Amino acid sequence: MSAKRSPTIGVLGLQGAYQAHMTRLHLLGAHTRLIYQARDLDQVDGIVLPGGESTTMLHFMMEDGIRPDSTEEGPSLWQALQRFVTQKPVLGTCAGLILLAKEVVPQQSSLGALDVVVKRNAYGRQRDSRIVYAESELGDELTEMVFIRAPMIEQVGPDVEVLAYRDEHPVLVQQGNVIGCAFHPELGREMRVHQRLLSLCD
């Protein structure tokens, strides 16, 4: 019997805290690959859309229709992601959650892969950042949640499973192969959010 293959998880490397996600995934035994352009998605079993600035990420993803090593036009990273997120496991944290949402307030483009309404920067400015510990569906131990200029999930659709709340608002949700997280699990000690992503790659 052959050994089980470790999954390769792509981490969007355009902007944001992508290195911390890679470190966390390596600790859990996964391989990682930075994602810069559409063809990179062919090499991975799942993807993390990290925190950062969602509008900046949008700009970069929509402007890469011509590959840097060729004059031949191809799909933009944004176009490729629209397909990828319907087929393979995805984790979006903070700005990544905004990119995945069906609706964003104030309005901006999104992948629409997660049936939620998300309000940007709803938990305040950088100075309002904090660490919260709360019960979740991840297990018996309290979940550590690092909030930094975090978005708020204002509504969830009927097919969305809420895995954790903060002050009665969902902060960790899942719909099929897509996980959305309003906080930064890669910046604390919490391992189970990334482990849940890896479990979807089995």
Image (tube, rainbow, N blue to C red):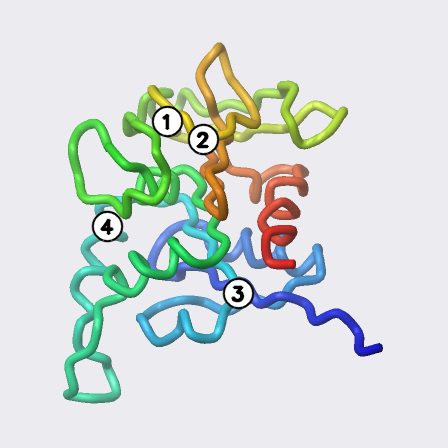
Amino acid type shown at disc 1: Gly
Q: Which residue is mark 4?
A: 56
User: Total marks drawn?
Assistant: 4
Question: Separation of disc 2 and disc 1 at Cα?
Answer: 6 Å
Front residue of 17 and 50? 50
The label number, if any, that marks residue 125 in the structure image: none
Residue at 56% from the left image edge and 24% from the top image edge: 164
Q: CA distance from mark 3 to mark 4?
A: 25 Å
* Mark toward the viewer: 3 or 4: 3
How far apart in space, not on screen, are marks 3 and 1 (Cα)?
Answer: 26 Å
Q: Which label number is shown at residue 157?
A: 1
Q: Counting residues from the N terminus, which is met first, the one under dot 3 or under dot 4?
A: 3
Between tags 4 and 2, which lies in front?
2
Which residue is identified by label 2?
Answer: 160
In three-dimensional space, the C-alpha distance between marks 4 and 2, rounded to whole angstroms, equals 27 Å
Q: Earlier in the sequence, mark 2 or mark 3?
A: 3
Q: Give neighbour class at mark 3: few <14, some 14-19, many 20+ (Cα, 10 Å).
A: many
Query: Is residue 20 toward the left or the right of residue 60 in the image?
Result: right
- The CA span between labels 2 and 3 is 22 Å
Residue 7 point in image, percent of width and height: 62, 66
Location of mark 3 (residue)? 45
- 1 shown above or below 34: below
Query: Residue type at mark 3?
Result: Asp
Above or below 115: residue 191: below
